Image (cartoon, rainbow, N blue to C red):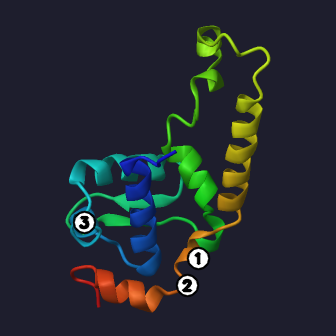
Amino acid sequence: MRLTERTDTAFRILMYLGLHRGTRCAIDDVVERCKAHRSQVVAAVQVLRKAGYIESSAGRSGGIWLAREPEEIDLGSVVTLMETDLCLAQCFQASRSGQCSLYAECLLRPALKKALDAFFEELRNISLRDILHNGDRLRALLGSPRGAV
């Protein structure tokens, strides 16, 4: 399993905004500092904003910022929000169950489901705050948003 670039971008956006709490950050700053594609950042921002993780305002003094406290954002919910396909195998999709002759008796599907559930359980126990614990070192790598004091 591999998380999509969109999910990775969403994590970097949230981390950047978490490091710069109280600052409106320009999307162009996020693109530059997080080394992400602008289209990916814009798409992720739209999803994160719609879900209430971030807020935004348009215009010259606009930008994006966290709408929740970092400890209220768990990694599992971000992955669930951003990933569109969490099927580890074809048999996870009901419409494809007929494509496998082993489907009725196979124990692979429940084993993979158990592993996926454990993966998400672990991610639900990790907050944005937890991964920002080394914030000073991360800020040194990313720098401050342009125009921030």
Q: Looking at this view, is 129 or 114 the one in front?
A: 114
Q: Residue 75: image x %, image y %?
A: 59, 60
User: Which residue position holds label 3?
Assistant: 35
Q: Is residue 130 left or right of residue 139?
A: right
Residue 129, which numbered label? 1
- Placement of 5 over or under 66, stated as above or below: above
How packed mark 1 is, by other alpha carbons closer than 10 Å (few <14, some 14-19, many 20 or more), is: some
- Placement of 28 over or under 2, stated as above or below: below
Mark pair 2, 1: CA separation: 6 Å
- Placement of 107 over or under 119, stated as above or below: above
On the question of residue 69 being in view, the answer is no
Instruction: Point out the image quarter for the C terminus.
Output: bottom left
Mark before the other along the chain sequence, 3 or 1: 3
Which amino acid does the dot numbered 2 rest on? His
The residue shown at (33%, 89%) is 140
Q: Residue 65: image x %, image y %?
A: 42, 68
Which amino acid does the dot numbered 1 rest on? Arg
Q: Residue 107: image x %, image y %?
A: 77, 28
On the question of residue 52 being in view, the answer is yes
Which amino acid does the dot numbered 3 rest on? Lys
User: Which residue position holds label 2?
Assistant: 133
Q: Are marks 2 and 1 in contact (CB under 8 Å)?
A: yes
Q: Looking at this view, is 77 or 21 the one in front?
A: 77
Mark pair 3, 1: CA separation: 22 Å
